[in-house]
Image: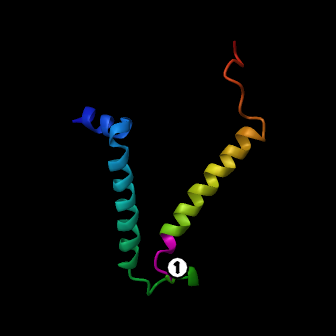
Amino acid sequence: MIKRVVDFFGDRRYAKQRRWLFFLVLVLIVIADFLVFREHAEYLWDRLPGWSAVYGFGSCVLLILFSKFLGHQGGLMRREDYYD
């Protein structure tokens, strides 16, 4: 069972299926966010449907971009043969 899961996520043959699965999960998350009751929302943006999905996606993108910036421009990344 585990081998099938690892093969599914690691093999190029299943790239199209993985992409469709990814988009399906994204759509389900946004739909689920429309079903949440918002009468106790404290801030204005908490009342917007889909805000949590957009905020989470934007946060992940910013985290990745900041990490790449630190690695390349901040001097944290080294060449492959640095320790040789």
Q: Residue at x 71, y 39 (%)?
A: 71
Look at label 1 and name its amino acid: Asp
* Residue 3 point in image, percent of width and height: 26, 32
Residue segment shown in magenta:
48-52
**Residue lying at 69% horizontally and 12% vertically, measured from the top left:** 84
Please name whichever residue, 25 or 55, is drawn nearer the observer in this view of the structure.
Answer: 25
- Depth check: give the residue in front, 5 or 17: 17
Could you tell me residue 41's position as x and y percent?
50, 82
Is residue 43 at all visible to an observer of this figure?
no
The residue lying furthest to the top in this view is: 84
- Tag 1 residue: 46
- Say whether residue 51 is magenta: yes
Secondary structure type for disc 1: helix
Is the residue 46 above or below the residue 9 in the image? below
The x and y percentages for residue 82 are 72, 19
Q: Is residue 72 above or below residue 30?
A: above
Kindly indicate the quadrant of the structure image that contains residue 30: bottom left
14 versus 49 height, above or below: above
